[in-house]
Amino acid sequence: MNDSLKVYAELLSAIVRINSITTIVYYDPENGGEECQLVKMLSWVAKSIPLLLWRSVDAIKLSSLVNAQLVFVACLPGLYRLDLLKTIATSLRYIRETKLLIELASDPDVDLVSRVLQYCLQRSMLNVAIIFGDFGQTQTLYVYDAYPEFMLKSQTFSDQQNIYPDKTIDLMGFRLRTMPDLSEPNTILYRDKAGNIRLLGYVWDIVSEFSRKHNASLQLIDEAKELKYLTHIQVLDLARDNIVDIAASVQPLTLRHLDRYHQYAYPANIASWCTMLPKEPLVELREAYLWMMPAITFCLLAVLWLVHDQLRCRWQRYRRQLGIGWKVLAIMLICNAQGRMLMLFIAPPAKTPITSFEALSNSKLRIFGIRSEHNLYDFDMRTKYSQVFYLSNKMSDLQWHRNSLNTSYAYTVTYTKWQLYAEQQAFSHRPLFYYSENFCFYQYVPFGLVIPENSPHRATLHNFILQLSESGLHNYWVTKSFYYMVQAGKLEIQELGEARSFHSLFIQDLYDVLLAYLLGIIISLALFGIELAVYHATYWLNN
């Protein structure tokens, strides 16, 4: 092996070693028509790793064939062949982070290199290096800086230097394009005292902190306006058309548009999609009396008395113990009733909660939801219980009713958003709503940020989201959602619901007790009259 060829071997070996390459793909669309030196060293370098030879102008979907770290080696003619560059970009769809080494079969041409690398930048292929046929003598290769703007660089090869550094670690002040969907409390729009537009919310925290960590800034692609919400499909379309780099929006990965899963980053959170129901009202006074001494207790006492009365003659020997037993039972009943009465003053019980769609359909309560989301529910469920839903076409209607905690409806909500309402109700003596898992439409749904399918920031965003989760920052920002809403003037810290009022007993409060007492007296007198009538009738008949 002569010295010039040895340099090519060292180049390939360094790329494989430094980047932990497990597969080499060699692309030669001219099928040997161009004289490239790299092909001579492939068999020597690829002794221990797979080598894929591709000699066609047709594109292939490498992401479905190779699921590992690979280096893409291309032998291209010394002309600007846009068709071949498009083939490479199409073949590397979803794996544009692949290391790409291009050998141009011509004399050095800086303008040609610049055009090729600028096209690679447009197609989000950042890890590209170009050499010419004189690389064996000059050891010169061409790379570029992507941030903050394109800059062509030439450097001398060294087998200790990584020619593919991660360009997305430091974005050099690059302006990341973004747009919030204004789905509160994920992203919250408000104006400060100076009238300037401000954004808050845990999703905005994620995006802004990501840009700060990687030395970038954020740029809104359009002016954010109140009530200008972005739907799920609108956010996906912005990413598909490369209008945004990272959308300030988390969307469910598994509910709809499943064919576009490449447009999501690593899940930022996993949440169930259930329902927040109004708290059941407290029992009324008449029901409270029945709760103090349930009917089943009276039935049990009646059964015990009948058994005792029937067997009284047989238990004459234990008459004293039976008398003590009845007194103990009376004390237990009095203590139980007194305890329940005190409980009524301290924490009165609520009415029976609604635990099923069947019970909900028999009540007056309805679930307030969005018509577009309703179509995602289970078909059998939404058909059988269609009457339990009250649907609207406007997201603003749902947000207004839900944020105001209007107890006229129940509301669909993810667990992440529920934490806002739970914190809002923490300042009240009795919550107005509770999160019910009996009315869940989807369990453990992953939610992820929306990004272009070939985003160069996917890997760094993936690591960043994992770091947020491990550090607890994500949960911390979510728990601050209520205070973000207060800061934006959307909500207030206040006592919700009617405060409990305490007063001395009125005669009206004892109406049911007196009525029961009167009824008992009437029954007793009636039984006493019957007993006297039976006695006198028996006496008269015998005489």
Image: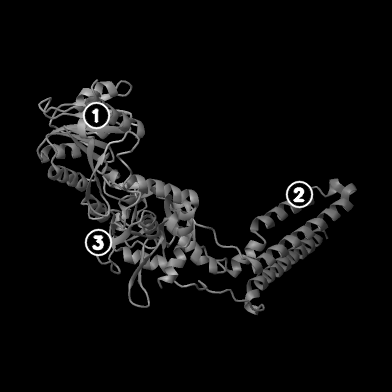
| Residue drawn where x is 47% and y is 51% of the image | 438
Q: Determine whether the residue tagged by mark 3 lies in a helix, strand or loop.
A: loop
The quadrant of the picture occupied by the N terminus is top left
Q: Is residue 232 above or below residue 90?
A: below
Q: Is residue 109 above or below residue 437?
A: above
Which of disc 3 and disc 2 is earlier in sequence?
Answer: 3
Q: Determine whether the residue tagged by mark 2 lies in a helix, strand or loop.
A: helix
**Mark 1, residue position:** 25
Looking at the picture, which amino acid does disc 3 mark?
Ile
Q: Determine whether the residue tagged by mark 1 lies in a helix, strand or loop.
A: strand
Number of numbered discs on residues = 3
Of labels 2 and 3, the one closer to you? 3
Residue 461 percent location from the top left of the image: 36, 49
| Residue drawn where x is 9% and y is 26% of the image | 33
Residue 259, quarter of the rendered image: top left
Q: Are marks 1 and 2 in contact (CB under 8 Å)?
A: no
In the displayed structure image, the side of residue 447 where residue 138 appears, left or right: left
Q: Residues within 10 Å of mark 3 (few under 14, many from 20)?
A: some
Residue 125 percent location from the top left of the image: 24, 43
**Mark 2, residue position:** 307
The quadrant of the picture occupied by the C terminus is bottom right
Question: Which label is found at residue 508?
Answer: none
Question: Which label is found at residue 221?
Answer: 3
Which of disc 3 and disc 1 is earlier in sequence?
Answer: 1
**Observer-nearest residue: 7 or 506?**
7
Residue 225 percent location from the top left of the image: 28, 68
Q: Residues within 10 Å of mark 2 (few under 14, many from 20)?
A: few
Looking at the picture, which amino acid does disc 2 mark?
Val
Looking at the picture, which amino acid does disc 1 mark?
Val
Residue 369, quarter of the rendered image: bottom left
**How far apart are the two marked residues, 1 and 2, measured between alpha carbons?**
92 Å
* Residue 432 visible in the shown view: no
